[in-house]
Amino acid sequence: MALLEAHHIHKRFGDQVVLENITLAFEENRLNGIMGPNGAGKTTCFNVLTGRYKPDRGRIVFDGEDIGGLPPHKIARKGIARSFQLMNLFDQYTAIENITLALPEVRARGMSMMHDLSTDGETGDKAAGILARIGLAGKERVEARDLSYGERRALEIGVALAAAPRILFLDEPTAGLGAEATGSIAELIAEIRRDLTIVIIEHDMQFLFGLADKITVIHWGQVIAEGTPASLQEDEWVKRSSLGGLA
Amino acid sequence: MSDARNPVGRWITLPILASFAVFGTLPYWVEAVGLYQYLGLEIMVWVIFALGYNLLLGYGGLPSFGHGAFIGIGAYAFGVAQFHFIPNLWICLLAAIIITGLCGLAAALLVSRRRGIYFALMTIAIGQVFFFIASKWTSVTGGEDGLLNIQRLPVDFGLFSIDIQDTASLYYLAFALYAVVVVLLWRLVHSPFGRILGAIRQNEERVRFLGYNVFIYKAIAFILSTMVAGLAGGLFAMAQEGAYIQIMNLQWSGTVVLMTLIGGGLVSFWGPVFGVVLYFIARDILGAYTEAWLLWFGLMFMLLVMFKPEGLAGIWRDTVGGLVRRKPAAAPSPHPNQSPAE
Amino acid sequence: MSTATWLLPHLINGVALGLLFALIALGFMLIIGVMEVINLAHGSIFALGAYVALAIMAPDGGLPFAFMEPFYALPAWPRYAIALVVAPILVGAACMLLELCLRPTYGKDPLYGLLLTFGAALVIEEMIRVVWGSSEYYLPIPRDISGGFIFADLIYSTYRIYAAIFACAMIALLWFFLNRTPYGAVIKAGAHDNEMVRALGFNLSRLRLLVFAFGAGLAAIAGIIMAPIWGVRPVVGIDAVIPAFVIIVLGGVGSFWGAVTAGVLVGLAVALTAAFVPDWSMISMYLLLLAVVTFRPRGIAGRASILER
């Protein structure tokens, strides 16, 4: 059984159907790509899987447990982490504090009112380790808003990583980045994928075809194609759509 | 940030000591500078109230516009406990804190799923509901007349007790409680709880996706701030020797927002302290010249919101602090979500 | 006499009150729509309208000007009619100043607009106190619309019926203005998307100035109509701005008929509580607000809005 499975998900807003009978499965320790044109329902799909929206119909099973309709914080605690398409950092906190607050051990004692995180060597070391891993060593004390755009994108991934997730959803991690920065994000993802299940929404086809084990194409709220990058390049649907040309 | 090698630094910092020095000596010099003892007492009560309020506004980013209700409830609870229960200072203060906290709990359950303007709206409504209940429940609150003849109870330590009938003595009780509140709040805002609350202000959604139950954090922050308001209310009842309905109206709820902001509660832990001091001194000094001192104070407030939303603390930071400390590399435009970390 | 008929005058009072509330709320909503500002000063502007009308009608209104003497000699009707037109225009023009003050807050957290207008409310209220003092005034109204009449053994207030009709007419005019004139189209475009205003070739700053003045003028008109019912006091503003809030939340931000429906609902709720438990009449509104915001935050016809940010 796959680590996370979504069966026959429907989601509508008012009279607009955004997701129609979506069925997805993400195998453990694989890197899954989701692509499709703007407005196809990719981000809505993420939002349903991570609990931001409740699905109108359908089942979401994570590691054998039905998580459909749980609130986001409960889903997050089960080991599902995500980044956001738009920047979602704590701008006035330092890089290291952004990471620290995402650590599960900090979450466990979030209600502590007398404890002090900045004097806690253990969490500090762990957070510094994650910062080093995403290439932000030396930026610990810099406020998130003073980081460069590329550094912020990396920090987004770091925050998601810090939660020690079992599955990681990344929503357009390279949006707005130049070729060089995109390359370093690709390196970062290649490094972290070894022991992690990852799902990426991405516009950059080269990026996705180079990394993914499996790619799902979503259009009009439906899955229209699915397979390995190689098989997908042969797919009629993909060839006929503009997606094939890009790949 | 506190110093890792110095456990005392986690609890007491230089600004805290400085505030102790100023407020601790106040009764000795307040008359020399042309002011009077009762003003010091009023300032102390409102400083406690506003510091607790800023936990919500400055740290949680939750603009409660109904907080006047809670200082009022604290005052009534103190009086009722004194008249109908036991006239013991500690028990009455505890009653004020607990009863206000319970009312805060009821309110928190209603508002903690909201933020921004909706939060402000709901707190206005809740404040008004408490106001109307207090004004109509005459048998308990005395209605429009208020609850009269509340005693300044002696500070009872078992073996001995200290009489606080005169204003300066009551001031020292308020000061002692201020010291406790300020140390605890300072610790609180630097604890994981406080930092998560600050994260909620900056990006509530993100905090939720990190696995935190945002509702609980907001609710607890709300309840804690009402409990501090309850304590301030108990002191206020003794200061005024009565509890009155006026304090609970929307005007006063707005005034505590105004004080907290004008002092710079959005960017500094000490903002509420500056704001309260400025408000009361302005009231007395401007008030001596003109009946319409609130007009000038309101204009000053408008100018501040327009040009310097970080308030007095922001001005201090940019002038005095800027000479000492590195200024942020790229100062973004003022935003209410700035961290009151200093 | 059955309960239903005994209640009739109360119901009429409720509808009159509700329509006036709706009028305040609609101006309030225009300002939210175009400027994304929650105008806490709306109540003080409402009060200011009544005071300015008082001053125009003088001589009991506190501000008699010598050059106006011939005007004061006129009978009540023309003086009242002129005050009803001129006072809102003056108030609207004065409130343009407030809009200028609001400009630094645009594009920032809506909390800033809220705070600035809270300060403005304080300033306007204090200015009223400085000019007119704290005592209560009554706006002199023409005899034809004052007093009461008896119909089927029940006493009705003539003025309430006049107020209800007047508010109805104003709401209808406003609807016509917003939906059937090019100016209305621009305002609605502004409420939808500021870019659209520029695309239509209008100056956004000027639109904001005018819409703010217009919303303020509506509040002033409501203030003048409400004056004989509530009396003219500096603190009357809070009693006006809170119902506007409630109505916006209840009706849903951006919905014209939602606001009118909610206005009448709130008016009826207040009037009916007043009929049975007079002391508690105002609290019914707050309970209504809490219930609605708890269970249906977007109101009857609401969409996602600035209020949720």
Image (tube, coloured by chain):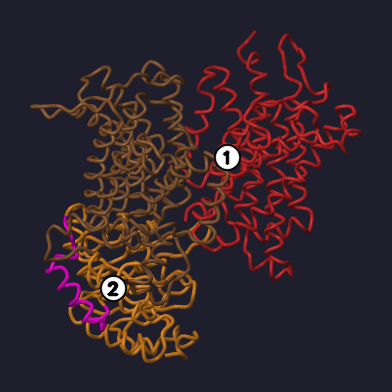
Chain colours: A orange, B brown, C red
For residue C63, what is the image quadrant? top right
In magenta segment, residue A116: yes
Q: Secondary structure at mark 1?
A: loop
Q: Secondary structure at mark 2?
A: helix
Q: Chain of mark 1?
A: B
Which numbered marker is on residue B290? Answer: 1
Q: Is residue A216 visible?
A: no
Residue C177 vs A18, above or below: the answer is above
Q: As rendered, which of C221 and B173 lies closer to the eye?
A: B173
Residue C289 vs C195, above or below: the answer is above
The residue at the point 33 percent across, 71 percent down is B324
Q: Amino acid at mark 1?
A: Thr
Q: Quadrant of the N terminus of chain B?
A: bottom left
Q: Residues within 10 Å of mark 1 (few under 14, many from 20)?
A: some
Q: Which residue has dot 2 on it?
A: A95
Q: Quadrant of the C terminus of chain B?
A: bottom left
Q: Amino acid at mark 2?
A: Ala
Q: Residues within 10 Å of mark 2 (few under 14, many from 20)?
A: many
The residue at the point 79 percent across, 55 percent down is C181
For residue B43, what is the image quadrant? top left
Magenta part of the chain: A115-139
Label pair 2/1, CB-CB below 8 angstroms: no
Q: Position of residue B245 (x, y in %)?
A: 43, 27
Q: Is residue B61 visible?
A: yes
Furthest-left residue in view?
Answer: B159
